[in-house]
Image: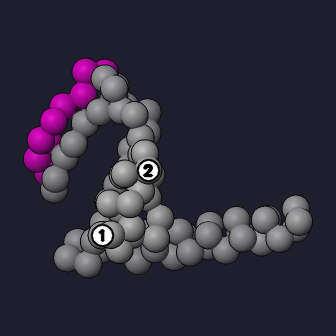
Amino acid sequence: MKQEAEIMQALGCSEAMNLDGGTSLALAKGSRILWGTRRKLTNVLMVYDTKHPAPSSLRLSWKAFQNSERVAERVQE
């Protein structure tokens, strides 16, 4: 995990996560499935970048979520 964190930092990431997909692992790009899963998925992690940005409604909801989390952290302190 430490090596993965160092790699992500070297790539310029300020936040990253490591997920153990096991048989739930699947990978798609656009409309193509590059690696199919062996069972139905209940959660999906989507990645957007500058070439393929997230829809504005999703960006706004993520900002709202981030702000509410920070407020909740301050309240608990």
Query: Within 10 Å of the Cα at label 1, are there few (<14), some (14-19), or many (20+) other Cα atoms?
Result: few
Question: Residue 54, position in %: x, y?
Answer: 34, 70
Q: Is residue 54 visible?
A: no
12 relative position to 72: left or right: left
Disc 2 residue type?
Answer: Lys
Q: Which residues are magenta?
A: 31-39
Q: Above or below — where is 56 with respect to 1?
A: below
Question: Residue 64, position in %: x, y?
Answer: 62, 73
Kindly identify the residue that appears in the image at 25 percent across and 36 percent down.
26
Q: Is residue 48 visible?
A: yes
Tell me the element at label 1. loop
The image's mark for residue 11 is 1
Residue 15 versus residue 25: which sits nearer the camera? 15
Query: Within 10 Å of the Cα at label 2, are there few (<14), some (14-19), or many (20+) other Cα atoms?
Result: few
Residue 12 versus residue 68: which sits nearer the camera? 12
Residue 7, quarter of the rendered image:
bottom left
